[in-house]
């Protein structure tokens, strides 16, 4: 980053993007409660004082709180601007690459949560290896004639999924799929992105190297005798808040499911195609991945109702994250799309048409149809479903941005109660913004303006005043629900982690050391370790952050 703001900000009423803006980017701050017209003073990097004149009033549709949106878009010179409203002040950074550091940190986070290997390039976050997963038991729910219950298999590598220490195929596949979709849009950007990981000096972009660390685990999660894929690798119960090396529970692979198997098929098909130019580093992988993807899809076709039923798992019972799903239509659409792009086989296109969605939906681990839509959009305007997928995407984006100029925080996200809930900052903010960036790139219409506004919201221009990414901004989470960050005796949590965000469901309130300070939808957030409903981290959430912020960094307008 070329410049930095050294001043410590003192603010309670001012809400602003605490990371920075491009020179040509729209710039807004929001002032809580008090009309700031005539009270806002901006000191430019050269020392000149200006008073903005454009102020818009907005009222929260549920809390009734009054806010004032102040337009500072005329601040176009690179530098650090001091903004004050009465006795409060903040520093607003304008930079040629404001998102460079945070984008890189969001991807590097995946290195820090690798399993089964010592972390040696993490600085103060270095740690010894934990969970080698070379002695994993086949759970009775996953048993087959050639792999009976109790069979010992080796299933190393991969990432810790969230605040816990387990590995889940459904969520890992979604995470890889979303990041590979971003890679396919930005190959030149990722070719030049160095995240300082052990593989950084090879011939493969660091993003693909990081994905490969998880794909190596994927290779072990398919039953080699029938092609089905185990739903997850897990302990029976969540571990305590201890370091990985201190964990002692046995680990199991559990039930093969249609959703995990289809997600696996989609990711392996995409990986087979995208890793082919990098055979020097990963010889034979593309052919292996292609074969495993087709075998997985065949198993799913033969077992279309094999949904995960955690409550039925016995000897031992399992109580960790379920990632359950009652429909596989979206998974069939994504997997068939990926396999058609890889093989060109008519059978996959026939299935694509059978499972084609009626509308574009925000990408989530539980609804991956949009990952299939992104595939068709990436395949180009001559592909079979390009036009209908583009029409659906544009309709979705137009609806998302229609009320921005009336919103409290000048953002397409955060204007409905339904925008808030478990993992909302990823699923409804970042993933929606990724869709906007697709629409911007494909239509030439300026949807990127709205994506930047979502970044503003995420990075501090919101009801709590938090920059919701650890290690960045003037006010960011210090106590995420993340076992390593809690147990490693390092004061600061891993940098680059996106927390789940405001969650009015407050499913964790019985476990909290104190009550939530607010029940309002956009304020139901607590920066305490016990708040798994609002302050946990997860790979799918960080994958959305990677796709979003790396795309913004690549724009460099």
Image (cartoon, rainbow, N blue to C red):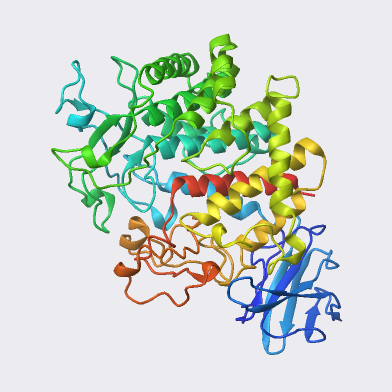
Quadrant holding the N terminus: bottom right
Tell me the residue at 72%/59% (across/down).
2
Toward which corner of the image does residue 227 lie, by quadrant?
top left
- Camera-nearest residue between 510 and 209: 510
Compared across the picture, whether 335 is left or right of 55 comes to left
Q: Position of residue 451 (x, y in %)?
A: 70, 52
The picture places residue 297, in percent across and down from the top left corner, at 43, 19
- Vertical side of 385 occupied by 12: above or below: below
Task: Identify which residue is drawn at 24% across, 42% down.
Answer: 311
Q: Is residue 485 left or right of residue 57?
A: left
Specify whether 269 is left or right of 416: left
Residue 390 horizontal/vertical position (percent) = 72, 33
Residue 357 visible at all: yes
Quarter of the view holding residue 307 = top left
Closer to us: 179 or 48: 179
Most extreme residue toward the bottom is 87
Q: Residue at the spot x=39%, y=69% of the render?
A: 528
Tell me, yes or no, if residue 496 can be seen here. no
Q: Position of residue 164 (x, y in %)?
A: 33, 51
Vertical placement of residue 398 versus 252, above or below: below
Residue at the limit of the structure toward the top, as seen here: 346
Residue 87 vs residue 417, the one in the foreground:
417
Please tell me how many numbered marks the rendered image carries. 0
Residue 376 against residue 417 in the figure, above or below: above
């Amino acid at each position: 980053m070329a410049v930095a703001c050294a001043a410590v900000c003192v603010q309670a009423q001012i809400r602003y993007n605490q990371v920075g803006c491009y020179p040509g980017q729209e710039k807004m701050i929001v002032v809580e409660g008090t009309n700031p017209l005539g009270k806002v003073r901006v000191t430019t990097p050269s020392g000149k004082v200006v008073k903005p004149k454009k102020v818009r009033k907005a009222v929260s549709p549920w809390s009734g709180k009054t806010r004032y949106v102040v337009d500072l878009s005329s601040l176009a010179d690179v530098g650090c601007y001091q903004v004050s409203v009465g006795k409060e002040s903040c520093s607003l950074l304008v930079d040629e690459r404001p998102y460079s550091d945070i984008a890189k940190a969001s991807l590097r986070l995946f290195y820090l949560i690798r399993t089964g290997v010592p972390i040696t390039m993490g600085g103060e976050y270095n740690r010894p290896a934990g969970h080698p997963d070379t002695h994993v038991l086949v759970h009775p729910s996953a048993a087959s004639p050639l792999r009976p219950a109790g069979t010992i298999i080796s299933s190393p590598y991969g990432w810790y999924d969230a605040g816990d220490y387990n590995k889940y195929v459904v969520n890992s596949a979604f995470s890889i799929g979303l990041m590979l979709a971003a890679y396919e849009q930005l190959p030149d950007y990722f070719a030049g992105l160095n995240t300082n990981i052990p593989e950084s000096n090879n011939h493969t972009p660091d993003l693909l190297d990081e994905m490969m660390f998880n794909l190596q685990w994927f290779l072990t999660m398919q039953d080699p005798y029938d092609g089905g894929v185990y739903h997850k690798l897990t302990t029976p119960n969540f571990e305590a808040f201890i370091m990985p090396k201190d964990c002692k529970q046995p680990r199991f692979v559990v039930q093969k499911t249609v959703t995990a198997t289809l997600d696996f098929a989609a990711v392996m098909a995409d990986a087979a195609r995208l890793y082919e130019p990098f055979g020097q580093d990963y010889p034979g992988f593309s052919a292996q991945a292609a074969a495993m993807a087709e075998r997985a899809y065949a198993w799913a076709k033969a077992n279309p109702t094999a949904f995960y039923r955690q409550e039925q798992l016995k000897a031992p019972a399992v109580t960790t994250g379920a990632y359950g799903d009652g429909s596989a239509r979206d998974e069939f659409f994504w997997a068939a799309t990926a396999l058609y792009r890889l093989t060109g086989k008519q059978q996959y296109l026939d299935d694509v048409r059978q499972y084609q969605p009626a509308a574009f939906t925000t990408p989530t681990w539980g609804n991956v149809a949009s990952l299939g839509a992104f595939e068709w959009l990436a395949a180009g305007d001559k592909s079979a479903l390009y036009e209908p997928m583009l029409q659906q995407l544009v309709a979705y984006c137009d609806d998302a941005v229609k009320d921005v100029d009336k919103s409290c925080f000048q953002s397409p996200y955060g204007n409905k109660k339904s925008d808030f809930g478990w993992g909302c900052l990823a699923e409804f903010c970042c993933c929606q913004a990724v869709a906007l960036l697709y629409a911007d790139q494909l239509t030439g219409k300026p949807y990127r303006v709205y994506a930047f506004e979502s970044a503003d919201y995420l990075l501090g221009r919101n009801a709590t005043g938090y920059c919701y990414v650890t290690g960045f901004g003037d006010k960011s989470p210090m106590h995420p629900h993340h076992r390593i960050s809690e147990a490693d005796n390092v004061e600061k949590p891993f940098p680059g982690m996106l927390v789940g965000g405001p969650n009015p469901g407050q499913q964790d309130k019985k476990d909290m050391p104190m009550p939530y300070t607010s029940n309002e939808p956009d304020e139901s957030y607590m920066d305490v370790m016990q708040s798994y409903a609002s302050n946990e981290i997860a790979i799918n959430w960080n994958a959305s952050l990677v796709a979003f912020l790396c795309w913004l960094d690549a724009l460099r307008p």
